[in-house]
Amino acid sequence: MKSWIYRLAFASASALGLVACSTPSALMVKEVGSYHVGGRSVTLSGLPPKELTPTPGSPPIKVDPNGEFEVEALYARYTRLANPKAKYPLLMWHGGGLAGVTFETKPDGAPGWESFFLNAGHDVYISDAVERGRASWARYPEIFQSEPFFRTKKEAWELFRIGETGSYSADASQRKALPGTMFPTQAFDQFAKQSIPRWATNDAATQAAYDAYVDKACPCVILVHSQGGNFAFQSALNRPGKIKAIIAVETSGSPDPDRTDFRRLKDIPMLWVWGDNLYKYPFWEAIVARQEKFRQNLATAGGVGDKLALRELGYFGNSHMVMMDRNSDAVAALIQKWMTERGLMK
Amino acid sequence: MKSWIYRLAFASASALGLVACSTPSALMVKEVGSYHVGGRSVTLSGLPPKELTPTPGSPPIKVDPNGEFEVEALYARYTRLANPKAKYPLLMWHGGGLAGVTFETKPDGAPGWESFFLNAGHDVYISDAVERGRASWARYPEIFQSEPFFRTKKEAWELFRIGETGSYSADASQRKALPGTMFPTQAFDQFAKQSIPRWATNDAATQAAYDAYVDKACPCVILVHSQGGNFAFQSALNRPGKIKAIIAVETSGSPDPDRTDFRRLKDIPMLWVWGDNLYKYPFWEAIVARQEKFRQNLATAGGVGDKLALRELGYFGNSHMVMMDRNSDAVAALIQKWMTERGLMK
C-alpha cells in the first residue's frame, strides 16, 4: 500500500507538472537580478580630445573626454529564494582590494559561502563597492582624488596569513605556507586573479553608496569581511533600524571605539569571526585589539557582541580569507548556528 | 475521487519534502558559481614605494608597487539549472565600455535577458571581459599599454541610438529621444552607472581570455553584443567544434569578411539581430554593411546566416541596447524561437 501511495503521489505530481521538483538538492529560486545604487553625476571640462577605434575593423571615432559621467555607485546582485527560511536577506560585503567574488565559488573550485547560505535558506545579496568590479571606477585625479594601489601576490600571501612575512616566492613550488594552513595554497594564483585595484581616498563615497544600498535592500543581515567592517558598522550608525545583525569576519576596521555611541548599536546582535595565527603578526594583533575594544564597549552598552575565535574552538590554520579555506563550510555552519540562536531564522 | 487523488498527491508530495515545488514560476537551480579563466602573471620592478592606510583607524602599511600580479583574466558567473531544456549552456558576452551587467536586470528594474533565458531553460553564463568589472584591470602604461577611455553620457545617448546626434542635454528633462524609442529613457542615468572604462590596446589579451573561456565552458551557444561580436567570431575560428551557434546582437565588428576562411564557420548557425534607426547614423550604416558582407559570405560558403532586422519585422524603436528596451522580452522570444528551430533545444 505504501509503495502504491508513493507511486500515486509521484504520478500525480508529474501530472501536475511538479516532476522536476524530485531533483534532490536543487535550489528553488524566485528571482535573480542586480542593480546599481547610489552615486552621482559629475561633469569634466577642459580635457583634450582623443581618437579611439572601438573594435578592429570598425570606423575610428573621435572621443571627447569632457562631459558628464555617473560615478561612485555600488553594484549588487541578488538571488531570492522561493521559500527563504531566514527572516531577512543576507548581504555580503567584501574587503579591500577585492570584490563580491570573495563569496562566490572558492579559488579551488569548491562552493563558497554564497552557495552555503543560499542552501541554508537565505536570500543572498553580493555587492561590489564603489571603485571595485562592476561598480566601476572613475577617472583620476579629476574625480577620484588619488591613484590606485594594486596588491602584489606577495602582499596577499603574507598579509592574508597564508604564509609568514618573507615566505613568498615567485616560484609557487618554493612558497612557504604557514604550517597547517587551511587555505588551498595550490589555488593561490587563481585567488590572485580576484584582486582589484583600490583607492585610499574614496571612503566617503563608498560609505554613501553603502548607506544608499542599506536604504534599498534592508532590513537585512550583513556579513562583512575585512575592510568592509568599518563601512558596515558606520551604516548601522547611519541607518538605525535597518540592519538586524552584523557578522564581522576578520574585520580590519571600525569607527573609533572610544567615540562611538553604542546606544545606537545595542539592539543589533554582532558576531566577530577570527581565523588562526593572528598572534604571529603585529599588524593583525593591533587590529584584533581595536575590534575587541569595540566588541566589549558594545557589550557594556547592553548589546550582543559574540565572538568565534576559531583557534580557541579547535579550528586551526584559518587564514584571513576564511571563506576560501578548506574548512569554510564548517565555519559557515558555526555562523549559521549563531544566526539561528539569535532568532534570525523563521 | 479525482479531488481525493489530488489531495493525496499533495499530501504525499508534502511528506516527501516536495511541497515547496508547488510555487509557480520558481527556477529549479542546480548550482550558482563563478570563476576567473585565462590571464598571466607579470612582474613589475623599479617603481618607487608608497604608503597606504587600508581602513580608517587601521595601522598604515608601506606598499611596494613592485612584484608579481595576475592580470588579463576573464570573469564568468553561471547559473546551472536542475533540468535545462537547452542542449548547451548559453554564454552572454557584453559590448564595449560595459560588463556582464548588460544582461541582468534592466536599468528600469524589469527582468533582463538573463532571466528570460533562464526561464526558457538555458544554463546561463555571464562574463566580464579582460579590463572590465570583476575581471579587473592592470596598471598602465606598465602592463596595459595605454590609458583607458571613459564613455560620457552624451556618447552613450547618441551612439546607442537612444537620441539623435546632438540631442543630449545635461538636464534629463531636456534630452530629445528618438521618436518612438523603446529604450526606457527615464532610466538612462541608471543605465549610465553600468559604464566601465575601456582600453583600445587590449584586444589580443581579451581574445586570449575569451578563447580560454571557450575551452572551459563550451560546447556552448554564444549570445554576443556589440564589440563582443569580433571576439566571438574569432573564438569560433580559433576553437573549432566548441561553439554550436552565435547570436550576434548589434555586433559592431568581425574579422575581415574578405579574409575569413568561412569553411571553418559554416557548421555554426548564426543569427544577426538589429534594432531600429540604423539608417540615421553613417557610423551604424558602415557597421551593418560590413556585418552583412560577413553574413552573406558565410551563407555563400554553405553556412547558416540568419537575420532578425527588427524594423523589417514590424518592431520599431529598438536601440543599440536591445536587451534593455521595453520590448526586450518580445525580441528574446524571437531569438528563442530561432534557437528552437535550429535544433539547439532538447
Image (spheres, coloured by chain):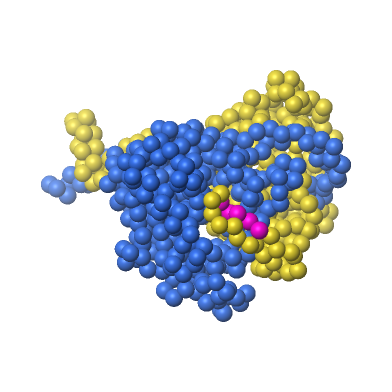
Chain colours: A yellow, B blue
Q: Residue at x 58, y 35 (%)?
A: B38
- Front position in the image: B336 or A325: B336
The quadrant holding residue B220 is: top left
- Front position in the image: B260 or A295: B260
- Front position in the image: A68 or B2: A68
Residue B19 magenta-drawn? Answer: no
From which residue to which does the magenta span run? A51-55
The answer to whether residue A31 is left or right of residue A44 is left
**Residue B62: image x %, image y %?**
86, 41
User: In the displayed image of the protein, which residue is found farthest to the front?
Assistant: B258
> Is A148 located above or below residue A214 in the figure?
above
The answer to whether residue B164 is left or right of residue A182 is left
**Residue B138: image x %, image y %?**
70, 43
Q: In this rendering, does residue A200 appear at all?
A: yes
Q: Main secondary structure of the magenta part?
A: loop
The quadrant holding residue A202 is: bottom right
Q: Residue at x 62, y 35 (%)?
A: B39
